Image (cartoon, rainbow, N blue to C red):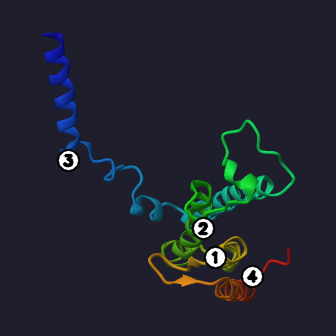
Amino acid sequence: MKRFIKISVVTALLSMTGCELFDPTEVVNPNLTESAILDTENPMLSWIGGCDRQVALISNASVTIAEIASDNYQNTRTFFNQNLDRLNILFTDIDMNTLQFAIHRLREMADYGLTKVAAADPNTTDNQLAKLHIYKGLASLFSAEYFKALPGAPQGSVLLPAEHLQNAIDEFTSALALATDQV
């Protein structure tokens, strides 16, 4: 009888995972919608802070990978990728994917800030726009520096490092044209 109950419970749980009740891809948070963010006062300030955070995450991921792949660190008794010690770096590796996604996320965050957040915030300054162009240029620079080829846009064509470098130069040039700070 106990076995029948256990089988029934497991069957019920497995059958419920197939229904729409447990769809993990459709997260709805009424406190965090696009309009809730864009309709706040000075949303560009928060957006720039988020971009700053993303640059820090990229730095963390890239420095860790570079240190382990170099002779600066002996990767023993850790749970980090042991393949990097032998310089067996694959683009399908989870650590490489993490770095790729972090770089793409920065590019998309900068682009979204330039197109959507700037339009929603009348207090956006030229220096803030310049900073977003710098972030977008950094994403292209990191793409060229760390990878043989990466897409330059969502579902876009794969670009070679020279093309990413040119995109970075274009973004940095745009930033210089906008920047008014003498820092």
- Residue at label 1? 136
Front-most of residues 17 and 22: 17
Q: Earlier in the sequence, mark 1 or mark 2?
A: 2
Residue name at image x 60 percent, y 67 percent: 106
Q: Amino acid at mark 1?
A: Lys
Residue 57: give x, y in percent of width and height.
Answer: 66, 56
Left or right: residue 4 compared with residue 104: left
- Quarter of the picture holding the N terminus: top left
> Dot 3: within a 10 Å radius of its alpha carbon, few (fewer than 14), some, or many (20 or more) residues?
few
- Crowding near the residue tagged with mark 2, few <14, some 14–19, many ≥20 C-alpha atoms within 10 Å: many
Which residue lies at the image location 86% right of the left edge and 54% below the top edge?
Answer: 71
Residue 36 occupies quadrant: bottom left
Tag 4: amino acid = Ala
Tell me how far mark 1 sits from mark 2, CA to CA.
Answer: 7 Å
Mark 1 crowdedness (10 Å alpha carbons): few <14, some 14-19, many ≥20: many
Q: How many marks?
A: 4
Q: Nearer the viewer, mark 4 or mark 3?
A: 3
Identify which amino acid the numbered label 2 is placed on: Leu
Type of the residue with mark 3: Glu
Q: Are marks 1 and 2 in contact (CB under 8 Å)?
A: yes
Look at mark 4 in the image and give the residue it sits on. Answer: 179
The quadrant of the picture occupied by the C terminus is bottom right
Q: Are marks 3 and 1 in contact (CB under 8 Å)?
A: no
- Using the image, determine if residue 2 lies above or below residue 30: above
Q: Residue at x 44, y 63 (%)?
A: 39
Q: Nearer the viewer, residue 124 or 173?
A: 173
Q: Mark 2 = which residue?
A: 106
Circles 3 and 2: CB distance less than 8 Å? no
Q: Secondary structure at mark 3?
A: helix
